[in-house]
Amino acid sequence: MEIPLDRDKGVPLARQIQTHLERLIGDGLLGPGVKLPATRELAGQLRVNRATVALAYDELVASGLARAHVGQGTFVAGPPTGRRAPAAPTAPAAMDWTALLSRAARIAAADEERLRGFGMPNASSTVISFAGGMPDSALFPTDAFRKVLNQVVRDEGESLLQYAPVGGYAPLRRYLAGYLLRFGVEARAEEILIVNGAQQGFNLIARTLVDPGDVVAIEQPTYTGAMQGFRAAGARLMPVEWDASGPRPDVFERLCERQAPKLFYCQSSAHNPSGLSVEPETGRRLVASATRHQVPIVEDGFDGSLHYGPRPGTPLKAVDRAGIVIHIGTFSKILFPGLRVGWLVAPRPLIERLQAAKQLADLHTSALLQAAVHRFCEQRLLERHVTRVTAEYARRRTLLLAALRRRMPEGVTWTEPHGGFSLMLTLPAGLDAVALLPAAVDRGVAFTPGAAFCLDGGGERTLRLAFSSVAAARIDEGVRRLADVIKTARRQPRPRRSERELVPVV
Amino acid sequence: MEIPLDRDKGVPLARQIQTHLERLIGDGLLGPGVKLPATRELAGQLRVNRATVALAYDELVASGLARAHVGQGTFVAGPPTGRRAPAAPTAPAAMDWTALLSRAARIAAADEERLRGFGMPNASSTVISFAGGMPDSALFPTDAFRKVLNQVVRDEGESLLQYAPVGGYAPLRRYLAGYLLRFGVEARAEEILIVNGAQQGFNLIARTLVDPGDVVAIEQPTYTGAMQGFRAAGARLMPVEWDASGPRPDVFERLCERQAPKLFYCQSSAHNPSGLSVEPETGRRLVASATRHQVPIVEDGFDGSLHYGPRPGTPLKAVDRAGIVIHIGTFSKILFPGLRVGWLVAPRPLIERLQAAKQLADLHTSALLQAAVHRFCEQRLLERHVTRVTAEYARRRTLLLAALRRRMPEGVTWTEPHGGFSLMLTLPAGLDAVALLPAAVDRGVAFTPGAAFCLDGGGERTLRLAFSSVAAARIDEGVRRLADVIKTARRQPRPRRSERELVPVV
């Protein structure tokens, strides 16, 4: 720590140190719970006696700004998550940062502002939330993963903690080549690039293929983060609406003819938000159009293993003979979101460019985490885990569908998910999901408005119910509350939308 | 695995399965060492008898395409890293991907092509390599890290493996606020964003502040990845040359006056390649110019802890009163590159935009790794490690400087590094480092040509010698070989440059 000391000033050095630290604490720069440097250490740095520093610390403790713990040191007082730092900035706000933002940053800011409107009010724990589209962490195989982490650090820690090849940990790429064959996807290890989750996947694709102003065809509804990513790359998004069997091939074909899109983004299995899968015939038609018009399809694969029918759906990549489909996969849904490990499959010339984009983005994905995932898979722990969680998610799905049938008033419809974590519900005409949300949260139930999954103006009457994180015992009660809110809303005039806090939609 | 079976065809099912697998193996889609699905599993998927699958596998083993290991299963034959997959693509190369590349991807490809010329010939292990600018993995505290990994997974694994806040793991951000104070950098935890290493740091900055065509002022020489990153964002790079005290303030001031750069990138301590630090007076002048012209400075901090003088250098951020400096730090040099954990410090309005860019890029950095690093730091293991490795790197630095003084012919000069892993050497007039490299490798010594750290046409006579990864006992011999090569080259006509393989420069 640098503390400017004036040795000719007449003010005692201890006092000068104390005043400086008081300012740092007052400005929130030394936050509650932060440990002050050891007296010996700081004395050495400032070239003063250790007693001088100790005196300054004593004064801070006496004034209540710090706490001393014998044998541990001196800490800034207050709980770590206590009062917020004062709002006043430490430096004059000399820079007008807004004026300096790039076009991409301005687009992202506007998009974020728009999504803020669909976010959740601060909900208490009594609220039954169907809003979180993530796996249930209560089902995580945390301890088994701790063991494989241990093994890989023991066996090859030194090389896993060093810089690593940008393409990914070779054994994981080879494993994935075999894994993907289960779904009919044929890829060589060299055609697989390891990325930090699907989100990085479509970002690298956007940077590699999309220039500002390009048209990107995108399924509707779709994953929010994909729309944000392509938009921030400067793309103009054009919708291809889903019907019960997938994104409509006739709409896609027309779009290819008239707009020459740079690419088409869709989720072929466990579609978020609806949980539906693209039916094989629809998939074949989409791939045929794409091949004819030379429009790459970006297929966000979620994870085909998480399906509720007898067998997984057929990825578009499995029927792609022209090498036109870029396939994205991730361990986030099927294992742990927090790993941030996913993959891209693309033909050789393109995967090399995606790899270059990955290197520019962050050199490579942590080899340690890749090796741990590989070890986990290799020991067949992933398969066991998938069997276990799929059974539990299937149970929650069944309970949700049963509750909807039992509780929902006429005019409400919903999808029956083939895979994934959620379904999409459509409200009776005249109702708006965004407007309904505050009343729902008051009543003790939450969801994600469908507008979050749609381009401007779409999805008003729809909402997403994610069943993955709701305990089985609370599902029926949650649906009962939601049904009440819908019934009440039908009898009332439409309320105004209100401002809400931003929560990322996953 | 999907294997299309024709049950009316007359060809036995086992034979059909065998033929399909033969094709997958022949095409390299099932690579050497890949485990075939268990017979029971595949039989279930294909709805055939288990004996049918076993028969197919037996045939593969008989023909040498697979190996059976009792109790383990059947594996594709050949060593995992054996012969390459055949070059022929599986699908017709229908797509002209090159024509579809974005401007950013084309810039990155051209840059990569240019760097290919500075890469290393394939060097054998007898070559003493001063080319790798990474920490020595033999010094890694791997086992201590394994223990903290264990602790954090035990204590909070479930939440660390779930989605996490984009800004970073809160205790790590608080720790960093205190850590940065040691170097005089005052930042609140909320002004710190955790990123996947410094490389992601300047990429997020580029995306947030740089539009295609913008001017970016950049120190010369500088870190290769930074030039690539800003260039791929479409920036026009304008050089600010280093002298012995840092990037020249007069050049920067003139550039600000005439070109209105969008930002200025430099490394203030442990400068890569030279190892020099920006002197305080030079730093103050750079910050004053930047403040006057409202040009943000992107300060790539490497790690100030790794210094060879009595105290660390002063970061530009420490003298920044206007909040104009964006500071980048990383654990890659001081701890493990493989973690991919670093951080950005920026004023509030900008850090929010950088955070939005981070969310679009990959949602967040693995909270598990962040928590492990935090635990490692909190237990003061980082400080112990830094003390230990700094002593070892200082020893190698001293040996290298002594060897240079002893061995180099007249006309060769070099920097005396204050920090970091490398120094920069200047060859006598008339020599070119790129041209010298093949002869050096033949003689058993390697380095990185200085041109890799410079804009087009710069740095021809310079080269980087990294001492961090060279065992102390080999340093003198390496320098002796290099001196021989230089002496020989002075007596010879200039050889032609040759094509070499691409190796990322770190």
Image: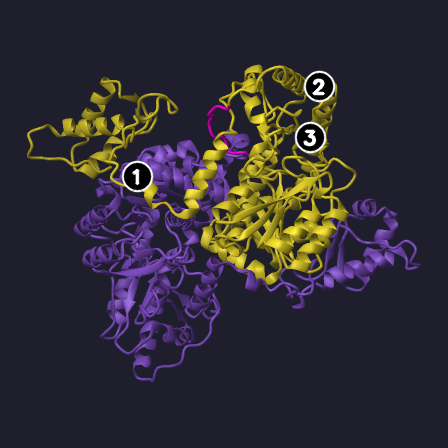
Chain colours: A purple, B yellow
Nearer the camera: disc 2 or disc 3: 2
Secondary element type, mark 1: helix
The circle on residue A180 is 1
- Tell me residue A180's x, y (percent): 30, 39
Membership of B501 in magenta stretch: yes
- Tell me residue A400's x, y (percent): 30, 63
Query: On the rendered image, what quadrant is the C terminus of chain A found in?
Result: bottom left
| Residue A329 vertical placement versus A175 (above, below) | below
* Classed neighbour count for the residue bearing mark 1: other residues with Cα under 10 Å, few (<14), some (14–19), many (≥20): many
* Classed neighbour count for the residue bearing mark 2: other residues with Cα under 10 Å, few (<14), some (14–19), many (≥20): some
Whether discs 2 and 3 lie on one chain: the answer is: yes
Q: Which residue is mark 2?
A: B409
Membership of A457 in magenta stretch: no
Alpha carbon of mark 2 to alpha carbon of mark 3: how far?
25 Å
The answer to whether A234 appears left or right of B137 in the picture is: left
The foreground one among A177 and A38 is A177
Q: Which amino acid type corresponds to the residue marked 1 in the rendered image?
A: Leu
Give the main secondary structure, helix, strand or loop, of the magenta stretch. loop
Alpha carbon of mark 1 to alpha carbon of mark 2: how far?
59 Å
Nearer the camera: disc 1 or disc 2: 2
The circle on residue B393 is 3
The answer to whether A483 appears left or right of B495 in the picture is: left
Secondary element type, mark 3: helix
Disc 3: which chain?
B
Disc 2: which chain?
B
Q: Which residue range is magenta in the image?
A: B497-506
| Residue A378 vertical placement versus B66 (above, below) | below
